[in-house]
DNA sequence: TCCTTTCCCGACCGGTCGTTCGGTTCCCAT
DNA sequence: ATGGGAACCGAACGACCGGTCGGGAAAGGA
């Protein structure tokens, strides 16, 4: 039965007509397709059948490569977290003045975010709905805390603007950097390194002591002359 | 049948023991409970049964107030979008120098985000999975475009830092401001107005022309002396 | 050539989803 | 007190969910 009765999915469609056969999958190749779907429709809203179809497979075939849907998510989140924590170990993030270390950390974080865009994007959307998501959330909090401590250390050197709570500064900084995942698309005009330099610079400039006051009055323009 | 067999939910539990009867719902009161659940577990991951339980109702009772699950989402998103667009109509956002208008717009956006926190949070998590979500996404893009045009106008006065693309600046600005919804909780130490002033100030300071250069070299500290 | 391993399939499972429906309870104006 | 609409209920619907299973095709070493 089923001599050739398979309904073809996205991948198979693209290959159709060429002599090339549909690629056989290993976990990492399948992970790439799955994460793409998770981002497009959301993890919960993506069914195993849709995952299979997007890969040109039946849904039961997914289970040859992953033991469960949650295991796919775990592997994707782990990849993002490992890449981010690796930045913390880099020399530029460990030695030097707090300000220099913070600059390095932010810039490299943006670079990792861009290079591992789908995986980091998925990580940033996790809300803690399952054991895996809670685990990822906690690991991510560790990373954020390291950034916050670096901002606090920078503040203790007097380089932070007056009246700006270091914790708030760290959150605004991370929020700005993380938001890049919501619009950046590879192949655009921005190179990863350039974007990282500009974003880190804008962020640090924002929380630095150069501004006039910690709290402007309504109607004040904080920009220009 | 069902003499008193209802299983009580979150709201009913809290009311239990007091002489007060469980509140009867109107759409807006129910919306508040529903949005809270949507944020906690995600829209797709929240079932009608869970919505009902959180409100102390059976799941079928929800349909007395809303025609469908998606209608609840639509009403919540509409509330957030209406509040945001109202800011665009304020005098401070329409008259004055571009820089002053931008400051007003950002500051008031943060205030709206804080006051309507659950609804705006839900809006910022929409990914376009349904007709309603696509509609909200498009309205939100209109708002973002207004901000971007204001940043561009500010740039044309020479107040933007050299080498910073206005579009990129607007995205970083909005990303920073929007990220507040991910950690702000009412009742904390920050008042809405203070947070709005500081956040707008930090953001505008970041993209302003005060910094040294548009792209720092690796190892440079963009902060402090 | 043959045999083993890898890869993949359709059919099926119990359970849950959003939604519908007929009927019951509550509140309030009359 | 009573009629009627608003609020609410449990049961049930078809569809689909994540996951399982036994077996078949393809690949690769011998």
Image (cartoon, coloured by chain):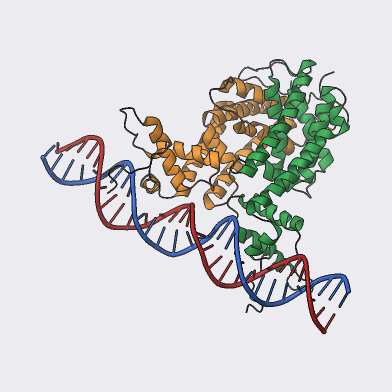
Chain colours: A green, B orange, C red, D blue
**D25 or C13, which lies in front?**
C13
Tell me what residue is drawn at x 54 percent, y 32 percent: B117
Q: Can residue A165 be seen here?
A: yes
Apparent side of residue A142 relative to residue B137 in the rendered image (left or right): right
Numbered disc total: 0
Q: Can residue B163 be seen here?
A: no
Quadrant hosting residue A57: bottom right
* Percent of width and height locating residue B81: 53, 38
**A107 or C29, which lies in front?**
A107
* Percent of width and height locating residue A77: 70, 45
Apparent side of residue A61 relative to residue B225 in the rendered image (left or right): left
**A18 or A8, which lies in front?**
A8
Quadrant location of the C terminus of chain B? Answer: top right
Q: On screen, A216 above or below A89?
A: above
Q: On screen, B137 above or below B182?
A: below
* Percent of width and height locating residue B40: 54, 38
Tell me what residue is drawn at x 76 percent, y 57 percent: A29
* Percent of width and height locating residue B7: 38, 42
Q: On screen, A96 above or below A183?
A: above
């Amino acid at each position: 039965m089923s001599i050739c009765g398979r309904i073809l999915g996205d991948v198979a469609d693209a290959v159709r007509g060429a002599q090339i056969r549909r690629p056989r999958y290993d976990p990492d190749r399948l992970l790439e397709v799955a994460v793409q779907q998770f981002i497009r429709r959301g993890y919960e809203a993506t069914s195993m059948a849709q995952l299979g179809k997007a890969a040109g497979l039946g849904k039961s075939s997914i289970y040859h490569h992953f033991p469960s849907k949650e295991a796919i998510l775990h592997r994707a989140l782990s990849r993002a977290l490992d890449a981010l924590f690796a930045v913390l170990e880099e020399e530029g993030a460990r030695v030097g003045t707090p300000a220099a270390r913070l600059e390095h950390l932010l810039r490299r974080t943006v670079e990792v975010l861009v290079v591992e865009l789908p995986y980091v994007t998925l990580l940033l959307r996790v809300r803690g709905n399952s054991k895996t998501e809670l685990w990822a959330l906690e690991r991510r909090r560790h990373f954020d805390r390291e950034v916050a401590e670096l901002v606090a250390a920078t503040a203790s050197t007097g380089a932070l603007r007056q009246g700006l709570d270091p914790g708030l500064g760290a959150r605004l900084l991370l929020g700005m950097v993380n938001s890049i995942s919501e619009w950046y698309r590879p192949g655009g005009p921005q190179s990863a390194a350039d974007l990282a330099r500009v974003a880190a610079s804008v962020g640090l400039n924002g929380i630095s002591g150069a501004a006039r006051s910690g709290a402007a009055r309504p109607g004040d323009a904080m920009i220009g002359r």
